[in-house]
Image (spheres, rainbow, N blue to C red):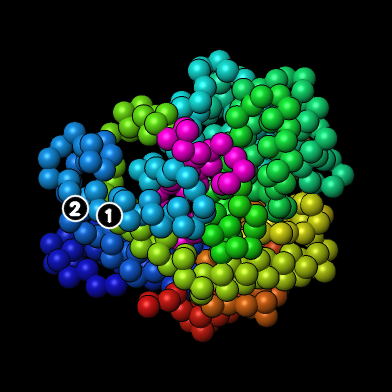
Amino acid sequence: MKYNHLQQQDPAVWAIIEKEEQRQNDELELIASENYVSPAVLEAMATVLTNKYSEGYAGHRYYGGNAVIDEIELLAIDRVKQLFQAEHVNVQPLSGSPANAAVYMAFLNPGDKVLGLKLDHGGHLSHGHKVNFSGRLYNFVQYGVNDKTGVIDMDEVREIALREKPKMIVAGFSAYSREIDWQKFKDIADEVGAYTFADIAHIAGLIAGKQIKNPVPIFDVVSTTTHKTLRGPRGAIIMCKEKYAKQINSAVFPGMQGGPHDHITAAKAVAFGEALRPEFIEYSKQIILNAQAMAQEFIDRGYRIISGGTDNHLMVIDLSAKSSVGKEAERTLEKIGISVSRSTIPNDPNPPMNPSGIRIGTPAVTTRGMKEEEMKLIVSYIDEALENKENDLKLNNLKEKVKLLCAEFPIPTK
Ligand code: DSN
């Protein structure tokens, strides 16, 4: 990308950005929550819309001069409605955790009981972990995955729900590779009179691409970030039934946030437009095919994948059989130009800073146009690196191979 003014005016910042662009070009991104936005999304973010304050909503702003901003916000909302069959949409949340905070604020009072997935079983900090605002403000009880299968045990979810009578049930994850039975969650919630909240941050793109079932028509409220499989700018949205529109809007503003980031809203609209195109269905399909090819190759090489495989874009790999741990693997792979994130495994005996596993995802490499063959090759590089973590010569050699593969599949510039 050309940054002429930046280069001239502030060469120090420009040089750092250039360095990061080079790193992204030369290295493989396997962090399940990351992706490469299109040049059009990138351009929308670098626009004069950043100059505007627009607290409030279209037609009801607290500042003048917002007629044009109303247009972009309404366009973004309309595209989300088409993508997810949503009744009401708020496109202002700045990111995933603030979006989830707004959802809780809209439906709960501090101290209310909520049921969510445990962090070390694949949940998210904002689904009730004790160090997070969610676990501090609300009374979370947690469900997990089955010890043997690694899959969410819906009988256990029902049992806990009947016993604890939560006011809200949260379904969603940041490190879980199986499809979620939205209807079953809704049935359980109905039995105990709880609200249903789905956090689809990781899989929103796969839902938009029609590869995974959509909870929006079933659940009361759904949040998602926009920058993961959905391949938009860093940010979030909330979708809900029309009857909750007012309480969700008031929770986002003035409850949680001030002015929305209008340049990001424009970039979200561009990304939603891209996700509405037929090519996005092909992209989503390939993300899953790639993840499944990768998981199988890991299994064939003796690794344990939690739950035995994947239905989505990610997998959590237990490294214990390979005498390795998450942090060490993350660092070794960084040396060969592959980014992954360390991850806990269910009931992890190791601490969260150095857990037993790594989480790997395929959205970014699929954006580069890679397919199943390349996934197998990448797993072979990972395996070789982890088997030779003290051998700098081997690691340097692998780094060269990764760079060559990246050059063959450049990040799209169109
Ligand atoms: N940081 C995101 C992830 O990596 O899953 C979740 O917030």
Q: Is residue 82 above or below residue 237?
A: below
Dot 2 surroundings within 10 Å: few (below 14), some, or many (20 or more)? few
The magenta span reads 216-245
The C terminus sits in image quarter:
bottom left
State yes or no: residue 339 in magenta: no
Residue pictured at 50% horizontal, 18% vertical: 109
Quadrant housing residue 289: bottom right
Residue 329 drawn at (x, y percent):
65, 56
Label 1 sits on what residue type? Ile
Q: Work out which residue is located at the far top of the displayed protein and give it.
A: 111
Q: Which residue is mark 2?
A: 68
Dot 1 surroundings within 10 Å: few (below 14), some, or many (20 or more)? many
Label 2 sits on what residue type? Val
Residue 351 drawn at (x, y percent):
67, 36
Q: Which residue is mark 1?
A: 72
Residue pictured at 46% horizontal, 57% vertical: 82
Is residue 385 left or right of 75 when viewed as pictured? right
Residue pictured at 49% horizontal, 48% vertical: 86
The N terminus sits in image quarter:
bottom left
